[in-house]
Amino acid sequence: MRAVVLNEVPSSPAVAEVATPRPQAGEVLVKVTASSVNGIDAATAAGFLQGVMEHRFPLVLGKDFAGTVEALGEGVEGYAVGDAVFGVVMKPYLGTGSLAEYVTVPAAYGLARIPQGLSVTDAGALGVAGATAFDSLAALDVAEGETVLVSGATGGVGALAVQLAAARGARVIATARPGAGTDFVTGLSGGEVQVVDFTGDLAAQVRALAPEGVDAVMHLAGDGAALAGLLRPGGRIASPVGLTKDAVADSGVTDVTVHSIMAEPNARTLDALAGQVVSGALRVPVAATYPLAQAPEAFAAFVSGKLGKLAVTLS
């Protein structure tokens, strides 16, 4: 089968022929129709995850997937060949990813059915970013009327977080560059989103909008400790990018709660996200779609900071 692979790290992703995987006990084999590029894929190619997770070469990249069940491993129940499914590859090692014509995934975790009304392209770009945004806001327990700062709003996670926070009735302040970045963010939600320029004096801009400090911060980009300093006393910050309580305390901010996020893309979360997309309450921010043969170009665009989600189609 064709797949996006690395033969070593760091290196640039390339499309190559590799063996088609077979489902083990408890797994399903999915014929992939759509996938997307995520930060973990770019970090793997850059070599940043060496020593963090086991690498199996040739390493097939990709976490998100959407497609149809092609075969069932021993003991799988609840799914049948031909089912339309989506989700996230959840394995304790890197190497059998979803930027490929076929992928094997555990049936019990990271897998859900595609509901009617959810396009396969959107489904293939929803899992990682959606679960990260969903779990971050759940940890922050954002309530109606609270002010939330989303730092890194033009990426896939941030774009979904802006929408989810606005849907909770929160006042959203989001970071973006002037121009296309600001236009992208303000067009995400029916609710008002106030955009601040992260290339300028971010603290002054946020303080002008929230003089007493914001209630919550989603740290997806930028200096997390500095962002924590923009919280009101008793505020909360959630970070899926490695911010720790110690780092915040070392910066002199001690009266806030720090949530280190490890997203859990279980079926319940995936179903909830899919339902919101189908209802029109949430839009998957797919900004560009690339055929598998052009997946290396998708990686280059991701690294360059292209707005939104970058999907890869395999049909």
Image: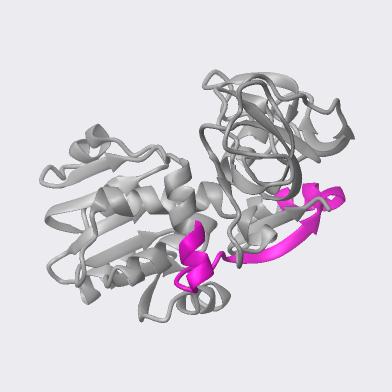
* Residue 273, position as x, y percentages in the image: 47, 57
Q: Which of 141/245 is in front?
A: 141
Residue drawn at x 46%, y 65% as measured from the top left: 276
- The number of numbered discs placed on residues in the rendered structure image is 0
Q: Is residue 207 above or below residue 231?
A: below
**Viewed as shown, does residue 145 lie left or right of 200?**
left
Q: Nearer the viewer, residue 208 or 38?
A: 38
Looking at the image, which residue is at 27% across and 73% down? 169
Q: For residue 42, which quarter of the picture?
A: top right
Task: Find out whether residue 170 is within the magenta segment.
Answer: no
Q: In this view, does 83 lie above or below 144?
A: above
Q: Is residue 23 left or right of residue 267?
A: right
Q: Quadrant of the N terminus?
A: top right
Q: Which of 14 and 101 is in front in this view?
A: 101
Q: In this view, does 258 lie to the left or right of 121?
A: left
Task: Identify the residue shown where x is 52% and y is 32%.
Answer: 108
Q: In this view, does 301 lie to the left or right of 145?
A: right
Residue 203 in view (yes/no)? no
Where 247 falls versus 153 (above or below)?
A: above
Visible residue check, residue 115: yes
Q: In which quarter of the image is residue 26?
A: top right
Where residue 44 sits: x, y (%)?
63, 33
Asked if residue 284 is among those painted magenta in the image, a careful observer would answer: yes
Q: Give the range drawn in magenta.
A: 274-299
User: Which of the colour schemes (rainbow, by chain, secondary structure, one colour) is used?
Assistant: one colour
Which residue is rendered at x = 68% and y = 59% of the image? 121
Residue 6 image offset from top left, x and y in percent: 76, 30
Residue 17 in percent (x, y) is at 90, 32
